[in-house]
Amino acid sequence: MKIGLFVVVFIKCALADGCAEYRAAYGIVCMCNETYCDSREAVGDLGNGTVAVYTSSKGSGKRMFRSEAKLTTSDTGGVIIEVDDTSVEQRITGFGGAFTDASAYHVMDNLSPKARDGLFSSYFGALGNAYSVGRVPLGSSDFSAQSYSLVENGNLATFQLRDDRSQGTDYKLEMIQEAMRYRQGRPLQVFMSIWSAPVAWKSCKTSPKISLNTCGGLAGRILGQNVPTYEFGGLSPDPAIRDKYAKYYLKFIEEYHARNVTLYGLTTQNEPSGNPMKNKWENTFYTPQDEFDFAVKHLGPVVKKQFPGIKLMIGDDQYTSVNTYGGLASKAPTVIDGVTYHWYRSLGGILENTKAILFNSAGGGVQIGETNRKYKLNNTKPGFSFTLATEASNGFLPGSSHVEPGSWNRGYAYSRDIIHQLGNGAAGWVDWNLVLDSNGGPNHANNFVDAAVIWLNRTHFFKNPMFYSIGHFSSFVPPGSTRLGIVGSDDSYVDNKEIETVAFRTPNNQIVVVAINDRLETTGKFLWILKKFATSRPALKTVSGNIKYKGQYVPFTLQPHEIQTFVFSA
């Protein structure tokens, strides 16, 4: 990708508030510079039965285009999406993305103040995506320029906030503080996740026994390389070290709190199942039982004593682990507040809400709904009460490009996943990196992926369709909203699985309905094989119908490859 090509063709800067289009290799992106960045129109007055309709479309190039409809008493025929006001499901925590070193590097160090204003307004402003949730790593992740911890040689007295620039500053924190200003008094709920414990506190004794890595696995025993690193090894079983490690989390929470960032929550470990295939990014391995024991016996008591309102979450791994972590969390409901999970077993949205296949290496999304129903999780009571989708990205599958500028298919994969996760009872949905470059990095492990926003240079960035796919939910469904049922909905589908849909009631008594008419185009090696495991759906065509609510109707027409959000007064 040649960055210069994007800059010279950017000619729609001030023509309208809408997308400044550039037709990139995979579709339309919306360009932003120092003088212009698109925003959406406000919902506006919803009196006299007015319905605000926001449309994004592959065919027309629309992005969050606002139009109006009217609530009427006439059913015009076609598909019916009937909102059940009596079926009140889970309370919504919110939507957002991750403040990684990679994102902070592009935004805080390499974007001009004027361009940065456009980016923060787009993500956190009231007329942008209005993100209300953020995730921040404690220490390094693979999306850092190098591995690092916040202490030296396991000495807690040396704790210091830092980032991947090897300086005693943290531009992730600075980015969060800036985002909070754009929230204009509305809370930004940030939770932390950790990739690796300081190496001095790790052990090969708690590493997986069957793996390709060289810490505790067969290869390690043969080669005599049973030495933990940032990438390999579990947490030491020594109770004194585990207590010290819990205080490491607490120090991070305290330091952020002292800088006016009070964390909403923390996950015990990012992807605790480890690196059995010798991936080269940071990790601390736990079995589910070991993670639970550390959380209940060490981490929870230390952190919640000083911050009793903080949310402690376990899991933060793949779909296929949710039932296991749900069962464990139910044993300590006053300590564990939620179970979190990542989307990667969906294989880019292909396998939504299916059973696990291929020895748990794909699918398994059905477990989210099973866990929420079994433990009656609706995010309305203290203690164990919710599941939360905490990471997603595109560009990780074999045979696909890491970054696909303008890919509508990747945008639909996101919106499809959000609908199915919320339909299964998740309290929210969090993207991975907020901003990456045109290579999908930086990433010290070469684990490059795509992002909703791509940085080009100091004055330019662009928004992918993924950005707007998330915005169709995050812009209109604030924290405290509740999901409502859809009459006759089958796994978030209506009308013979033509339309995917979900509905909400907001705290200010608005009804929000999101509906999608789309299909995934599976690309990449071997992925076509997985189609037989995915839900069978009819061919894509224009679909017309009505949203029905309390005897009133909102007519709609959804073109192929189109998503619409409807907002009206309850």
Image (tube, grey):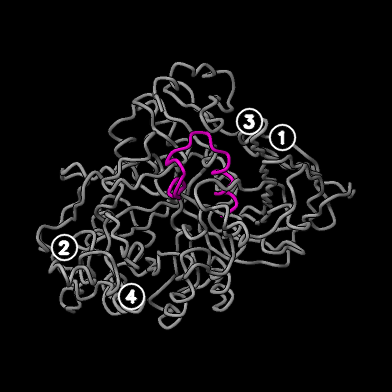
- Mark 1 lies on a secondary structure that is strand
**Can the viewer see residue 403?**
yes
State if disc 3 and disc 1 touch (CB < 8 Å): no
**Secondary-structure class at tag 3:** loop
- Spatial CA span between label 1 and label 4: 51 Å
Q: 348 above or below 65? A: below
Could you tell which of marks 2 and 1 lies nearer the N-terminus? Answer: 1
Q: Which residues are magenta?
A: 393-417
Task: Tell whether 432 sits left or right of 287.
Answer: right
Residue 545's x, y, as percent? 82, 48
Q: In the image, is 186 to the left or to the right of 16?
A: left
Residue located at (74% from left, 39% from top)? 559
Per the image, the residue denoted by label 2 is 199
Q: Secondary structure at mark 2?
A: helix
Left-right relation of 267 to 27: left
* Mark 2, other Cα within 10 Å: few <14 / some 14–19 / many ≥20: many
Query: In the depicted view, which residue is nearer to us: 5 or 80?
Result: 5
**Which residue carries the number 3 mark?**
61
Q: Which residue is mark 4?
A: 287
The residue to which callout 1 is attached is 67
Mark sitting earlier along the chain (4/2): 2
Q: Earlier in the sequence, mark 3 or mark 4?
A: 3
* CB within 8 Å, label 4 to label 2: no
- The local secondary structure at tag 4 comes to loop
Three-letter amino acid code at the position of disc 2: Val
